[in-house]
Amino acid sequence: MKEEKELFPLTEDKEELHPLFSWERFLFKWLAAAALVLATAIMFQHPSPIFEEGQGWMKKTMENEFPFSKAAEWYENTLGEPLPFTVEDWAPKEENREEAPGFALPAAGRILEDFQTNGQGILIETGPTEEVKAIKEGTVIFTGTKEGLGKTIILQHADNSESWYGHLASSSVQSYERVKAGSTLAKAEASQFYLAIKRDGVFIDPNQAVQFE
């Protein structure tokens, strides 16, 4: 009888699920997600004007930049480690680490074109082999070419602001990589580079945050 009990354990001996897990809640969320996807597909494929307002709302929502850097910071603070694909060489944060106030200087130089000239960013003259560095910790959400800026890198920060770096000769980072303030992003092109800061969807004067002169 003892051997038979070991071969066929009673139901109460089974490992219990996590107390926060609920099959009913999981099934409901899965069905709700499937219903949302189906409703979105119908809304965009149906020509009826009834869905025009919903289509406009959905497009506007999807055009907004996902706060990836904020989500990555929350993940790291909550679980104690970064998202697997954002950092190669990572070490746990030191307890009670003091953050440097303000913004890091991206590179030494002088302003050639100020914010008032184009209303978006500034052009800085620097040394021929000067490295351009991140002004603030963040996540790379774009690395490529933009019209008028050439090779460009865009960082998204935890407060959902962005810093743009243009006129770069080379890149030292890749998309979705987490970088610290002062980390090298690239080298300046032709002894100059472009810097812009975007906050709440609006460009602000970078010289108010980072003093070059």
Image (spheres, rainbow, N blue to C red):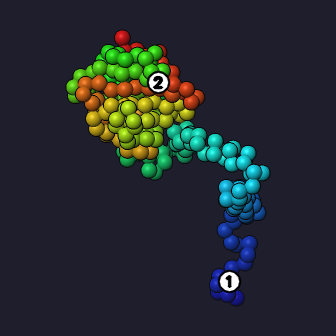
Element assignment for label 2: loop
Residue 163 appears in view: yes
Q: Amino acid at mark 2?
A: Gln
- Please state the horizontal and vertical placement of residue 148, each as a whole percent of the image: 38, 32
Choose top left, top right, bottom left or bottom right for residue 111.
top left
Q: Residue at x 51, y 28 (%)?
A: 198
Residue at image mark 1: 8
Residue at image mark 2: 120
Q: Amino acid at mark 1?
A: Phe
- Please state the horizontal and vertical placement of residue 181, each as a whole percent of the image: 41, 29
User: Along the horizontal axis of the image, is 32 left or right of 88?
Assistant: right
The Cα atoms of the two marked residues, 2 and 1, are separated by: 72 Å
Q: Residue at x 67, y 59 (%)?
A: 45
- Please state the horizontal and vertical placement of residue 146, each as a whole percent of the image: 40, 37
User: Along the horizontal axis of the image, is 138 left or right of 191?
Assistant: right
Q: Residue at x 37, y 26 (%)?
A: 194
Q: Which mark is residue 91?
A: none
